[in-house]
Amino acid sequence: MRLAIMGAGAVGASVAELASAYGHEVTAIADSNSAAIDPNGLDTEAALATKRASGTVGDDSPESVLEAEYDVLVEATPTTLGDAEPGYSHTVSALERDRHVVLANKGPIAERYDEVRAHERNSEGRVSFDATVGGAIPVLTTIDDIGRSNVTAVRGVLNGTANFILSRMAAESLDYEHVLAEAQDLGVAEADPTFDVDGTDAALKCVILANVLFGGGYALSDAAVEGIREIPGAALQLAAEDGQTIRLIGEVVDEEIRVGPRLVPETGTLAVSGTQNIVQLQTERAGRLNISGRGAGGDETATAVLGDINRLL
Amino acid sequence: MSERTDVRAHTVRLELDDEPGELLNALGPIAEHGGNLLSIFHERGNRTPRGRIPVEVDVEATPERFDRIVDALRQTGVNVVQAGAERYSEELTVLLIGHLIETDFSDTLSRFERCSSASVAEVSLTVADDATDASSARIRLAAHAGETDRALDTIREVATEKDITVISPLTGGDAV
């Protein structure tokens, strides 16, 4: 397949680097203000080297990628809320050209799922987005395999940054601010950690899960979301004295979406530590399935993107 | 602190003969021995095999006073089927985070009990060194079977009013 990649951050760059190993060819890549296009196959290494040196991937405009030769548009621009732009327009543009879209960007399918699906129905192209929930963990693929009507509830730890902070706070008896600073030094938390620590990122993933399980109709505004900033180290110690700990848990149960800090058994399945993510699927007839792994990272997310692309073949 | 939390909600289950004055007769000893009557559930349409009417009474009292109440009820010939915390068959542990002391912690706890018929079984409190910081508490509640959801709703209601964050256990997920 010929890939056009919108977004040259950690995920977009990794997809570009790994594409040939998966038997695909990159014909275009764009960052927020430039693009490199070659219908005969782009030298992705050169484009990424140019970006490292000059801050741009090439001399073309990002919009021109949408007009380029490609089979699959990889939407890896940063997640935005509300109108989910520019990711939403990129998705629509590809579908209107009867091209496939593989998203790593959560915005369009969390905030405008029904519209994206409506465009998909009028297109020869298909939309897939396994990378948006749980990074490298094949959550949506597994739901697809089980059959969405056989999944009765989903619970899990869906944000590695928040989980790192909570597990460090519990293990080292430290306060939130201290551990956040440490996480930022380690590159686990961003300079502005709002999306992660306020529960927004986990909530978007739950919204996507709800859209998949219930056939659409959900947006971020339908989720009840609480974050972890207000949790003092003392609260984690009180929990530990009782054999429990606190995790930021996302739930899709009874057609409702909740994200918030919850008490879970310290040695329980959901109490993963560090940046690990875990998703627990409750099924109609097959009990509970737990899948855990790395929920974020360039190569991890790119692996899920490339898996989606291979399934389009 | 210990003196105030000693006052607990207790449930007494009585069986009364279907005769005028029986209920009043049963309630007398409660007031006389300093119990605070919280609720009476009079199952008039529901008879025991011996034709008596079951009555459930929630009383707030210290354990000492509660023992005296039960003794006095038995002395006046009232049939006490069950008394005390035996019927609290489910437990619920929550964490509270916020300005717990400044918002009258003992009032918070007694309202949990008053409104939800749950009983506070254990409290661990960590007060923040700095008054501007939030304090934390772990509360273990004993609730009647099937009533933990209602207890949790009450806790959330009281907590919201006092700007206290409640961290509740995840239910329905894998416990182990």
Image (cartoon, rainbow, N blue to C red):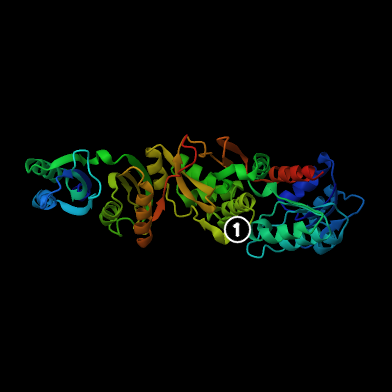
Please tell me how crowded label 1 is: few (under 14), some (14-19), or many (20+) other residues with Cα within 10 Å.
Answer: many
Residue B21, image x, y percentages = 10, 52
- Residue extending farthest to the bottom is A83
**Callout 1: chain:** A
- Front-most of B73 and A94? B73
Residue B96, image x, y percentages = 37, 51
Q: Left or right of B84: which side holds A222? A: right
Residue at 78% x, 45% y: name it.
Answer: A309
Residue A70, image x, y percentages = 86, 53
Residue at 18% x, 53% y: name it.
Answer: B37
Q: As displayed, is residue A227 above or below residue A148? A: below
Residue A186, image x, y percentages = 59, 46
- Front-most of B9 and A66? B9
Residue at 58% x, 35% y: name it.
Answer: A286
Q: As displayed, is residue B81 above or below residue A256? A: above
Examine the rendering and report whether any part of residue A43 can be seen.
yes
Examine the rendering and report whether any part of residue B34 can be seen.
no
The picture quadrant where one finds residue B82 is top left
- Residue extending farthest to the right is A40
Locate the C terminus of chain A and report the quarter of the image it occupies.
top right
| Three-letter amino acid code of the residue under disc 1 | Tyr
- Disc 1 secondary structure class: loop
Q: Left or right of A190: which side holds B144? A: left
Q: As displayed, is residue A271 above or below residue B21? A: above
- Front-most of A309 and A287? A287
Q: Which residue is mark 1?
A: A218
Count of residue discs: 1
